[in-house]
Image (cartoon, helix red, strand yellow):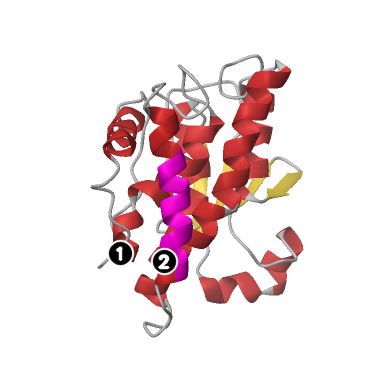
Amino acid sequence: MPTHLPPAMSTPTLILYGTALSGHTHRVELFLNLLGLPYRRIDMPAAQRKTPKFLRLNPLGQIPVLQDGELVLADSNAILVYLARRYAPGSAWLPDDPVGAARVQRWLSLAAGEIAFGAARARATALWGDPGIPLAPMQQLADKALGLMEEVLARQPFLAGDAPTLADVACYAYIAHAPEGGIALEPYPQVGAWIARVRALPGFVPMPESRS
């Protein structure tokens, strides 16, 4: 039950239910650290997600779940939006202007779509799933996402513009760890440079490497 206490702030302690090897959990944990918010992570392995206690927090039995006082939120991207609006209002993490907000939303959708069903699913299949499941469909989706990222990052340092946003937080973990699922990043040098820029952000915390 890791406890993370960045610089003291006048905010309540947040509780994050998840696991260290979950990219969905990591995107929330990463953002909490980037914001310097105190929080406590409670490990929630698969078996415990079926218990009545956890299902009261999220009836879908999925991680992550964030508890902020009496407020309970599920879905990693929804949690990111909440944290940005609640604890970093007016910041570049989630722009207020319509165009900036739409650019971020585009990548949140990609994180929940092509990245989730491509690189993320390939990693989960390689680490915990059926090795007989063909990689090709997941590789195709991963290549679509990586190709788009490569094109965008050739023009700007971060996914939604010149500054890091929730777009980068949402996409980082499963892209950076795509090789664990057999997805090569070498053909995408701009993506590799972006990964390095995200890792250089103040407050960055890595997701542990998985067995391969």
SS at circle 1: loop
Question: Which residue is at 66% across, 46% downward?
Answer: 67
Q: Residue 153's quadrant in the figure?
A: top left
Position of the C terminus, as image quadrant, is bottom left
Q: Which residues, given as a range, are shown in magenta?
A: 137-148
The mark nearer the N terminus, 1 or 2, is 2
x and y percent of residue 162 in the render?
Answer: 45, 16
Which label sits on residue 88?
none
Residue 28 can be seen, yes or no: yes
The main secondary structure of the magenta stretch is helix
Per the rendering, the mark at residue 182 is 1
Q: Position of residue 132 (x, y in %)?
A: 39, 85
Q: Position of residue 108 (x, y in %)?
A: 60, 41
Residue 124 higher or lower than 179, as above or below: below
Is residue 181 inside the magenta stretch? no
Amino acid at circle 2: Ala
Q: Quadrant of residue 198?
A: top left
Would residue 124 be visible to someone looking at this image? no
The residue indicated by pointer 2 is 122
**134 to the left or right of 44:** left
